Amino acid sequence: MKKLLSCMVLIIVISNYAKAQTGLLKFTMGYNLASPMGNFKTNYANGISPRGFEGDLSYGINNQISLGIGFGFQDFYQKFPRAIYGIASNENVSAVLTNTIQAVPIMAKFTYTPLLGKPVTIQPYFSAGAGVSFNSFNQYLGEFSWVNSSTTNLAFNADGGILIPFKKYNVSSAFQLGVGYQYINFNQALANNLNTINIHVGLILPLRSN
């Protein structure tokens, strides 16, 4: 009898929880670390950038799938040792080279949480996004700006991680930990893409539900 009652209570809790996720509007905000890859790392910024954040606004289509808008900001900074640089066909300068790059991606985002509605304490998730990134690139020779450009480029993102709910089995409010890959079409002389591996932590908060 006790087992039957326990099963009935669990079914009621899960069914109410599943219903609650559909139509739920959630806001996510977190801190992001980005590690450059490829020729972006070799030629522009070879260190991990700790100056970033990301977030999204999502709406629950059903118990496992949500759609929304993702956004972020990442600032890359790299200073190279003093060297000789050619600034004209017959003119060279000895200077410290400094690169600063800021990326602000905005993407349509799809998130899949396969175990929502099941009595699992830690929930895995997977997401993907596509959109554009607003990029700013500045290069300095000493104190003087050598290159200054602002572009809007295609951007893609794939991400996966875990959600740890504040309330048991309910990720409408949760702690998020994830690892992702981001591609931004950069189109500069020494790097076509801003490829990065990202590690982020954040909080998910509900805004409203139907």
Image (cartoon, helix red, strand yellow):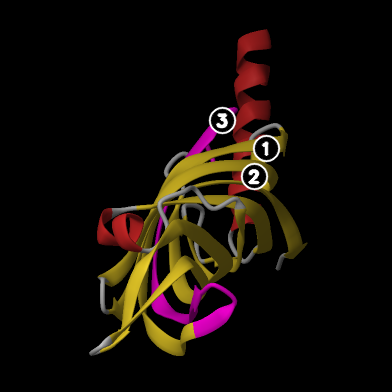
**Residue 115 showing in the rendered view:** yes
Tell me the SS state at disc 1: strand
- The quarter of the rendered structure image containing the N terminus is top right
Label 3 and label 2: CA atoms lie apart by 9 Å
Of residues 25 and 12, the one drawn nearer to the viewer in this rendering? 25
* Residue 201, horizontal then vertical, whole percent: 62, 44
The magenta region covers: 117-145
* Residue 151, horizontal then vertical, whole percent: 43, 88
* Residue 128, horizontal then vertical, whole percent: 38, 61
Q: Is residue 193 above or below residue 149?
A: above
* Residue located at (26% from left, 55% from top): 38
Tell me the SS state at disc 3: loop
Asked if the residues shown at circle 1 and circle 2 are in contact, with their CB atoms under 8 angstroms apart, the answer is yes
Q: Residues within 10 Å of mark 2 (few under 14, many from 20)?
A: many
Report which residue position mark 1 lands on.
Answer: 165
* Amino acid identity at mark 3: Ile
Asked if the residues shown at circle 1 and circle 3 are in contact, with their CB atoms under 8 angstroms apart, the answer is no
Report which residue position mark 3 lands on.
Answer: 122
* Residue 191, horizontal then vertical, whole percent: 27, 70
* Residue located at (54% from left, 72% from top): 142
Report which residue position mark 2 lands on.
Answer: 171
User: Does the magenta segment cover residue 119?
Assistant: yes
Of residues 104 and 65, the one drawn nearer to the viewer in this rendering? 104
Q: Is residue 165 above or below residue 148?
A: above
